[in-house]
Amino acid sequence: QVQLVESGGGLVQPGGSLRLACAASGSFFSIKAMGWYRQAPGKERELVATITSGGSTNYADSVKGRFTISRDNAKNTVYLQMNGLKPEDTAVYYCNADVVTSRWYDGGRPYWGQGTQVTVSS
């Protein structure tokens, strides 16, 4: 019914920047909150940033001031601008979206993308 596809990952040097994008497609009525999560080797998946349909944002303390989440509702796409990247940012980054899939129920259901690798290394 719903697919989320991430793009923009890659290899970057410490202090560099990357911009991730996640586009939703398929059969749905609307998207509520969207967010980015990451999972580093040997670590649990953690929240990076979230954004509501109205544009309210929330960030993990570890990325606050360096990362910026945004969305284009017309394109059903969420972005993550990552500046000042550090080696500890290395992880697989996953897109998440709360998607309304029923015309009779306006609550969202969680969907996940396949993940995109971000590697920060000299």
Image (cartoon, grey):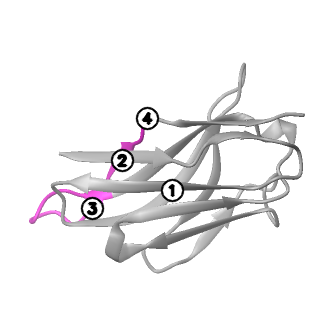
Q: Nearer the viewer, mark 1 or mark 3?
A: 1
Q: Provide the residue designation for mark 3.
A: 107
Above or below residue 50? Residue 26 is above
- The residue at which mark 2 appears reads as 4
* Residue type at the position of mark 2: Leu
Is label 3 in contact with label 2 (beta carbons under 8 Å)?
Answer: no
The label shown at residue 21 is 1
Q: Nearer the viewer, mark 4 or mark 1?
A: 1
| Secondary-structure class at tag 2 | strand
- Amino acid type indicated by mark 3: Gly
Residue, far bottom: 54
In this view of the protein, which residue sits in the foreground, 26 or 97? 26
Instruction: Choose mark 1 or mark 2, whichever is in front.
Output: 1
Q: Residues within 10 Å of mark 4 (few under 14, many from 20)?
A: few
Mark-to-mark CA distance, 3 and 2: 18 Å
Which mark is drawn over residue 114?
4
The C terminus lies in which quarter of the figure? Answer: top right
Under mark 4, the amino acid is Gln
Q: Earlier in the sequence, mark 1 or mark 2?
A: 2
Q: Which mark is residue 75?
A: none
Magenta region, residue range: 99-114
Measure how far apart labels 4 and 2 are at the Cα level: 7 Å
Relative vertical location of residue 11 with respect to residue 15 in this rendering, above or below: above
Residue 44 % position (x, y)? 66, 28
Asked if the residues shown at circle 4 and circle 2 are in contact, with their CB atoms under 8 angstroms apart, the answer is yes
Disc 1 marks a residue whose amino acid type is Ala
Task: Tell me which numbered mark, 3 or 2, is placed earlier along the sequence.
Answer: 2
Residue appearing at x 50%, y 36% in the figure = 115
C-alpha span from label 4 to label 1:
12 Å
Mark 3: few/some/many CA within 10 Å (<14, 14-19, 20+): some
Asked whether disc 4 touches disc 3, contact meaning CB atoms under 8 Å apart, the reply is no
